[in-house]
Image (spheres, rainbow, N blue to C red):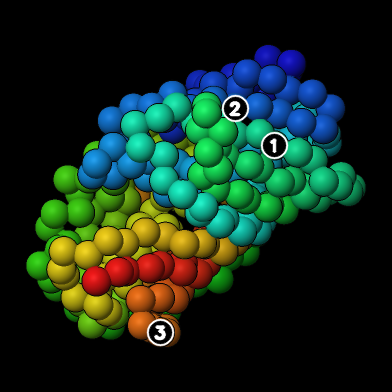
Amino acid sequence: MSDEIQRWVEESPYGHALGVRLEELHENTARLVLPYKDDNSNPGQALHGGCAASLGALGGQVLARAALGPESGPWHTAQMQVSYLSAAIGENVIAEAELLRRGKELCFVSVSVRTAEGKPIARTVSTVRARFGAEPADLTTSAGDHGESDPGQMGPHIGLVPFIGNRGIHVEHMTGGTSRLIMPWQDANGDLGGGVHEGAVLALLDTTGAMASWAESGPGRYKASTASMQLQNLGPTPRGDLVAYGSCVQRDAEMFWSDVEVAGASDGRVTARGTVLYRILT
């Protein structure tokens, strides 16, 4: 096992905050373990979807870094599809990654997340890009949103969810089918490379899409969860505060589709984007 890759997984501030461990790394497979922690949960001890997505991104990067070599960095998950299959309630989870194909600068990786007893939690398929020392991309600038700041009835309470609060995420706006969330820079969201860890970015994107759905439905005593998420990282996210803009673009009964952009709060440069498919049952 590569000491450098294991150090990145376990000693990046974000990985350390989650408590994730890289237990096995072979030529085409890897195994990561995430012990249960209240800090990673939603209410009711349910594992936050951002943690499962983070395991997918970690597994993808682990195998890409191993396959392409340390000189191929920096790396980022250019695209990932996350399907949430069931909830992990107060349980340790395991992520098993498989390298589907290695290219010259792209690696395609599938990750299965399950409980220690074998219950499927999530499945991810990612495309990881190695930049081989290339200069940072010239990122597009977000158009932002309407500029309103109304957190609604739910917004002030979102930061009380353990995993969200530990990321420093707070709601600026959450009404009328749109959401705007802020994630200020903090060390616990960092990567050993110096920027914001992909896992923290994915957690912000997931949460922003969910809040746009709630902003469309309105608050209530409902059962809700992210069904799936498609995301794109346009490049490694530099250190700094982030703002995420969510907009519910379609509702069909209990299903909500919300588009999200994540940008630098100071310069508006878009670092990630995606669509969150959310389900709210009355």
Whether pointer 2 and pointer 1 mark residues with C-beta atoms closer than 8 Å, the reply is yes
* Crowding near the residue tagged with mark 2, few <14, some 14–19, many ≥20 C-alpha atoms within 10 Å: many
Residue 56 visible somewhere in the drawing: yes
Residue 215 is situated, as x and y percent measured from the top left of the image, at: 24, 74
Q: Which label number is shown at residue 261?
A: none
Tell which tag, 3 or 2, sits nearer the viewer.
Answer: 3
Q: CA distance from mark 2 to mark 1?
A: 8 Å
- Choose top left, top right, bottom left or bottom right for residue 97: top right
Look at the image and tell me in which quarter the C terminus lies: bottom left
Which residue position is annotated with label 3? 252
Q: Is residue 26 above or below residue 86?
A: above
The kind of residue tagged 3 is: Asp
Whether pointer 3 and pointer 2 mark residues with C-beta atoms closer than 8 Å, the reply is no
Is 181 placed left or right of 206 in the picture?
A: left
Q: Is residue 127 above or below residue 281?
A: above
Residue 105 is situated, as x and y percent measured from the top left of the image, at: 83, 48
Tell which tag, 3 or 1, sits nearer the viewer.
Answer: 3
N-term-proximal mark, 2 vs 1: 2
Which residue position is annotated with label 1? 97
Q: Secondary structure at mark 1?
A: strand
Which residue position is annotated with label 2? 32
* Crowding near the residue tagged with mark 3, few <14, some 14–19, many ≥20 C-alpha atoms within 10 Å: few
Q: How many numbered circles does the render carry?
A: 3
N-term-proximal mark, 3 vs 2: 2
The kind of residue tagged 2 is: Leu
Residue 269 visible somewhere in the drawing: no
Q: Residue at x 35, y 64 (%)?
A: 210
- Viewer-nearest residue: 265 or 210: 210
Q: Residue at x 50, y 54 (%)?
A: 84
